Structures are given as structure tokens and as C-alpha cells.
Image (cartoon, rainbow, N blue to C red):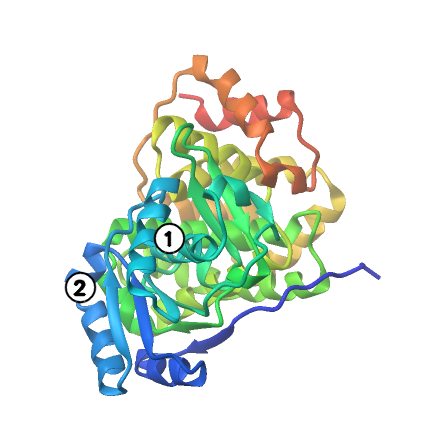
Amino acid sequence: MHPTDARPSPRIIFGAGRLAELPDCLASLGSKHALIVTDPGIVAAGHVARATTFLTAAGIRTTVFEGSHINPTESDIEACRDFAKSIQPDVLIGLGGGSSMDTAKGCNFLLHNPGRMADYKGYGLAKNAMLPFIAIPTTAGTGSESQSYAIVSSDGTHEKMACGDPKALAHTAILDPELTASQPQGVATLTALDALSHALESAVCTKRSPISSAFSTEAFELISTAIRDVLTGTADLETRGQMLHGAALAGCAIENSMLGAAHATANPLTARFNIPHGLAVTIMLPHVIRLNHSDPEIAAIYQGLARNLDSPLIDWLEKTISLAHLPKTEIPSSAIPDLAESASQQWTGRFNPVPLDHASITALYQNALAP
């Protein structure tokens, strides 16, 4: 038997058109004034107006902060915190991609807790209460709606900091696939591949448990069924729903386990060369799976995940990635030693099933970044 320390997951409301149930969620919390944290693109897509219309009709005051940015920094979080302090909401709503949800969660840390986000790097360091949080993803990939971590970049080093606390977990996540129709194809592609990496890494990490494995297995089933249509731009509402649901369940798997070497080696690529997170993880993932496959127990897990595929997992993965027609990324070989050093300091690497050292990380980069 595996010792298990499970964290609760949010209430998940899934289905087309279910954004309309947002007022009921807030009414159950006794909310009178909601702050929606989002970005200009989501405003332009009309999603904020829809949410605001529902809330206004229910008599709930709504204020919008549209200053979220991709890969939010400590300063971004503080700007949102200052805005929230000026209006005093009683509930936060993260409406958008992972960056909007992370900005809302980060704001929640600092509203009633002192300091900067760097002070909360790790887990369970916030002493004071947080506001209820409602997560409404408009992309299908990050799984932020299901996690108690805010991923925030350091202002100085651009290091991605995972700042987690059980109080930061969403009270409710509303998964409405109608909201994902506005995704640009490039965003849909990279978030889908990110979700796939979450399912695969959480399935084999050293913190996996029967609970997290149930989430990661179901997430992989949903994602693997939908991802080819998403990558080729042919996904219909049902397929987008499968991807959205799978991404959220992969987030639940992470919340109850962890990630691994693909994320540990991807983060330095993003920090140093500004490679989008989904692309960086995808570059590294096949090589990490080959490394992990050397462990017979992990190989058996991969085989189990691939039971409904038309080929072994690694072959299926590479064929799937090829459908995305990702841009070629050129990284000078001279950068690999520094990348390897940075990756060796990444928290997620500690949970990879095959232990990592500087040599093995260097080999991963050499294989992944070879011309």
C-alpha cells in the first residue's frame, strides 16, 4: 500500500453553456462584490461581458482587472493586489488562461499576507486567510484551475516560482468549452501539448498515488482522444470539451502528486530564451520519457497508458507532436552547461522517477537540442 496524503480538488462544473451558473456559485458563498482578473484578449473575445451580464442580473457587483500578462511576474501580482485593495472585493474570479488564474491566485496570497511572492515559494507558507476563488479557464492546458499553486516569475531572474497553499485552491472551477472557441490556433496547440505533458509526468512521478494515478489516467484518456483534432484545428465543441476536461483532471493529478524532468528542463529554456512554456516542455518530453523508460516499473505504467493507442507511447507521442508543426528552436550548445545547472535546481526535477544529476540533465539537453 502507498502512504497517501491527498489534497482536495475544487468543485468542477463541466459542460457547454455552464458559465451561466457563475451567479449561483457566488450566491452560495454570500458574495456581493466580485473581482474578475483577466487580460485584454479575453475582454475582446466577449467572455468578460458575458460573465458580467450574468452577475449583474443576479445583483452581484462586478469589477474587472484586465492587467494579466503571460508568465506573470511578482510586479504583475502586486499591481493586481493593489487594485484589489482599492475596491475590496469579497471573491476573486480568474477568467482566462493560466496566467490570469495565476495572477488571481497570486493576488489572493498578498491581499491579506505580507511581503512578495518570493516569500511564498514552496507550500503552505501563507498564514492568513484568503478570499474564495472561482477559476474559469478559456484555454485547455494549464490545469491551473485545479491547483493550489500560483506560478509566478521572479522580477530579477525570471525564475518560475511555484507558490502553493491549500487556501489558494479554487472553490469552484467552471469548465465551459464554449469559452475555448476563441483560442488562437497557436495557443490551442501549445496548451494542449502542455496538458498532455501534465498527464504523462504526474502519472510516473515519485509522489504518485492511487488517487493521483486515477486522475492522470483519465486525463490521458481524454487528452489522447482529443489532441489530434486540436492540433490540426479541426476540433468541434465535443472535442474541445474533452480537452478542457482532461486538462483540468491533469491539474488535479498534479495537485495530488507532482511533475518531473520535462518541466525541470523546460523552465530554464523559458527563463533564458523566452521559449513559450508549452513549446519548451514539448521539446524535452520525448527525451525524458526515453530516460524514464529505463525503469521497468515506469515502463509498465507507460505501457498501461498506451493500451488504447495505435502504437507504443513514445512513437505515438512523436507522431502527435509532428502534427503541431512546431517552429524549430535553435539553442547554442554553449548554453547547455548553464541550462543544466539551472535545471538541476528546479523543484520538479526532484520527483522524476529516474534520479537526475548534472550529467543526465546535460544529456537530455544535448539530445533535445541537437541540430
Please say if 12 is above or below 363. below
Whether residue 245 is visible, yes or no, is yes
The kind of residue tagged 2 is: Ala
Instruction: Report the quarter where the C terminus lies.
Output: top left
Q: Nearer the viewer, residue 166 or 355?
A: 166
Badge 2: residue crowd in 10 Å (few <14, some 14–19, many ≥20):
some
155 lies left or right of 354: left
118 lies left or right of 278: right
Residue depicted at x 60% and y 50% = 125
Per the rendering, the mark at residue 352 is none
Secondary element at image label 2: loop
290 lies left or right of 197: right
**Identity of the residue furthest to the left in this view:** 44
Secondary element at image label 1: helix
Give the image location of residue 326, x and y in percent: 32, 40
Give the image location of residue 10, x and y in percent: 52, 71
Residue depicted at x 15% and y 61% = 44
Instruction: Report the quarter where the N terminus lies.
Output: bottom right
Per the rendering, the mark at residue 103 is 1
Residue at the disc numbered 2: 45
Q: Nearer the viewer, residue 273 or 299?
A: 273
The kind of residue tagged 1 is: Thr
Tell me the CA gap for discs 2 and 1.
Answer: 19 Å
Disc tally is 2
